[in-house]
Amino acid sequence: MQALWGERRRIGLWRRLWLALMEGEKELGVGIPDEAVKQLRALLKARTHAIDLGVMQRDDGAHYFAVVAGTGFDAQLMAATGPEQKRRWKFVAYIARAALSLPTVHSVLQY
């Protein structure tokens, strides 16, 4: 039953439906970039990978987390977002900092 009605199958079905919708809209002349269709096709072939999660028990229950590392823009974003902003606004603090930082971002192609 899990193979027929499980989460993995449901996600795969939704991805295939989105791809069909994108391709149909593209045929109708909607400005869907070729790269977006290509990336969704690649996502359909993607496989899940297990990752290690940490858990911290607090008064309000278990909080799960994954430790990640980054370089470039994401590292600058993490460093520029202050502890008070992180505590108060959680994930939204990073979105706000990213929006404020976008005018200064340069891709390799821009050099």
Image: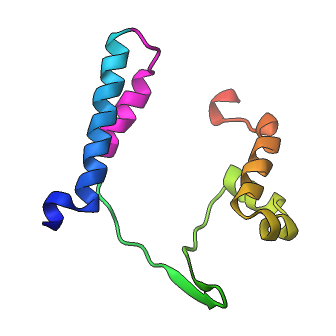
Please give the count of numbered marks on the rendered protein: 0
The picture places residue 47, in percent across and down from the top left corner, at 29, 57
Q: Is residue 99 magenta?
A: no
> How was this image coloured?
rainbow
Identify the residue shown where x is 35% and y is 31%.
Answer: 38
Q: Is residue 10 left or right of residue 68?
A: left
Q: Does residue 15 sit above or below 32 in this rendering?
A: below
Q: Please tell me which residue is depicted at 34% across the width and 34% down the height of the picture.
A: 18
Task: Give the left or right position of residue 55, taking residue 7 as reference.
Answer: right
Where residue 90 appears, as percent x and y from the top left, is 73, 64
Q: Residue at x 58, y 74 (%)?
A: 67
Q: Quadrant of the N terminus?
A: bottom left
Quadrant assignment, res 87: bottom right
The boundaries of the magenta stretch are 29-44
Apparent side of residue 79 relative to residue 29 in the rendered image (left or right): right
Q: Residue at x 31, y 32 (%)?
A: 19
Compared with residue 52, is residue 106 higher up or lower down, i.e. above or below?
above
Q: Is residue 34 magenta?
A: yes
